[in-house]
Amino acid sequence: MTLKYLIQKEFLQIRRNSFLPKLIVVFPIVIMCVMPWVMSMEVKNIRVDVVDVDHTVESQRVIQQIMASNYFVFGSQKATYEEAMKDIEKGQADVILEIRDGKYLIAANAVNGTKGAIGSAYLTQVLASPTVSEGASTLFLYNKSQNYKFYMIPALLAIVMMLMTGFLPTLNIVGEKEAGTIEQINVTPVSKWAFILAKLIPYWLIAIFVVTVCLLLAWGIYGITSAGSLVWVYVLAMLLALFFSSFGLIVSNYSETMQQAIFVMWFFVVCIMLLSGLFTPTRSMPEWAYMSTYINPMHYFIDAIRTVFIRGGGFTAIVHQLLALTAIGLFMGCWAVVSYKKNS
Amino acid sequence: MKQFLSFVKKEARHILRDRRTMLILFGMPVVLMLLFGFAITTDVRNVRTVVVTSQRSPQTQQAVDRLAASAYFTIVATVATPKDAELLIRSQKADMALVFAPRHSGVQFIVDGADPNMAQQWTNYAQQTLATAHPLPQTTRLLYNPQMKSAYNFVPAIMGMLLMLICAMMTSISIVREKERGTMEVLLVSPVRPLMVVIAKAVPYLMLALCILATILLMARYVLGVPLAGSLWWMVLVSVIYIMLALSLGLLISNVAQTQLVALLLSAMVLLMPVVMLSGMMFPVESMPQILQWIAAIVPPRYYIDAMRKLMIMGVGIGEVAKEVTILSLMTALLLTIALKKFKTRLE
């Protein structure tokens, strides 16, 4: 029964804070409204400068096609390659197309490698279009409209969960330490388990709330719904919440000041996130970095949620990830309890 | 002057005595550089491919061999029907399938399109690998970054993010912490002018930021092999302007926030999120809707990152980055004036 009172205390603490309740409600909404537009790695509006030495019908056709394509923005025609290079250096053009003696030279600014490569690939397609590519057709599964938002919404779910259920617990215990209120808990007969559990449960409820908000907004604003069963989306989200809230408390337990806690947490979170395949495919990583994904819960989560949400996979498709997430979550939960010391 | 120096010393001690934060402050740039330099790549590698064929002819065998020989693809299975291949893709055992239709000669690629960019790149690579050798009328030249290393793109971005984080977040927190603990009152009743107190707080962080800048530049050059093509002096100068800007932002936040928690959240939500999302660090600004592009136009790191990319990687002269540097300087001047004007010398 003490658990009930402890949870009540946690909720009161959150509610009486002038800032946190607003944050919990507003933050997921803002993120879902803005971020899908931001997080598109779609390559478009590539600015092309053309150096047309030939002035033939063929070169005119190519220029027309570049103007018509919605991947490209036609920059300007330049007399020489050097002049066009000046534009690239100023950042006013991304790709130069030089047409000389019926031959094409594509020079792409590849500081951003993906953009350079995809930009020049598109341009190659434009150049090659009259001769139909020989008998190879491509079928894109699942994300048929090649919509980046569909790919990124599960990732956003992960990011929001991470910020909400990861950072708030991190600030929690260390905040009590700094305020001195932890002393009062330490002198009560409340057990470690009850205390930590009471700290964790509010964040799980917040997680359910956040996931619901995110899914509703994805449906309402973007018309994107999960291809697979929602049950698995929730189960996965709860397992991730278990991991992150426990992890936040662990960091909180070992820290003395909020600043310290937040920096330690930030450090780990950035590593976990970057190595999870959220932004870049894990298979492109070198061997040593790929090994780290075996203990990275975010990697399992991203893999599984994308399988469910985008590919419409069921239990059999994600059983491996579910098991891994549960194991990691339980381990971290136990660690959170053990690392909390009642005697300072 | 002596008073001022002793204040700087006090502040430096504050930072140096917090071992764990120090470790993170210097560990973070190193780890981030290593991660972005080596681990985070968008190269096409190890694409797990399923071959769908009912009977193997020499012709299909040749195509499969060619794919298997390339470094980009690994053949993981051979199945009889496209349906089986789809099942493998759905359960994340494979990324794409190569279908040889029994009757006609063409091939079909079935690609996991969840990630549109990667799907596009996989097909491009596969088509190029399978294309029967005939000379294309065009040549492609990738400027500045021929191996398409993502580090070239990310190093300037990491600098923009870390300098902002360290300067703005750390200064605001350290000022607010003094408020919260009540020691600010002691400082304000001392004979030192209040403005001096604040400037003395900023100086050690400026030093710290410069150390981190040096660490990043050295690592970029010698560990990641990223060229420092432009003039080093201009890079440092532009960075100093940017650091000043971040420090003024930190000051502004510390004026608004009363508790460390609020200062932290404000710097994380108001600074860090826009920096990561809207600065063109990861996501291209020109693909965003117009309204977000306008917002992105007032995010300072965007100009810094742009300028550094040009100076570091492309090696252009200062003339080509004049626009970015002017905007950054104006923003710095503006923010610094507001921050100093707003600074409260009294406690509420």
Image (cartoon, coloured by chain):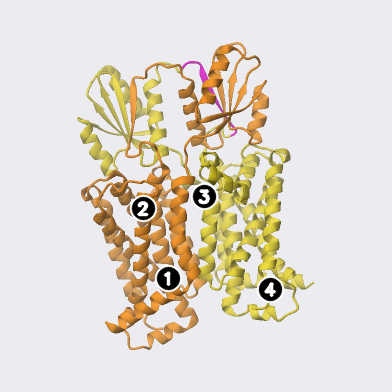
Chain colours: A yellow, B orange
Residue B235 lies in quadrant: bottom left
The reply to the same-chain question for discs 1 and 4 is no
Cβ atoms under marks 3 and 4 closer than 8 Å: no
The span from disc 2 to disc 3 (Cα, nearest Å) is 21 Å
Residue A166 lies in quadrant: bottom right
What amino acid is found at the position of numbered circle 1 in the picture?
Answer: Ser
Quadrant where the C terminus of chain A sits is bottom right
Q: Chain of mark 1?
A: B
- Tell me the crowding category of disc 4: few under 14, some 14 to 19, or many 20 or more residues within 10 angstroms, Cα based: some
For residue B21, above or below residue A208: below
Which residue matches tag 4?
A9
Q: Which element is circle 4 on?
A: helix
The span from disc 3 to disc 1 (Cα, nearest Å) is 27 Å
Kindly identify which numbered label has been placed on residue B302.
2
Q: Whole-percent x and y of residue A245?
A: 64, 61
The magenta segment is: A134-142
Residue A227 lies in quadrant: top right
What amino acid is found at the position of numbered circle 3 in the picture?
Answer: Leu
Which residue matches tag 1?
B172
Kindly identify which numbered label has been placed on residue A274.
3
The reply to the same-chain question for discs 1 and 2 is yes
- Viewer-side label of 3, 1: 3
What amino acid is found at the position of numbered circle 2 in the picture?
Answer: Arg
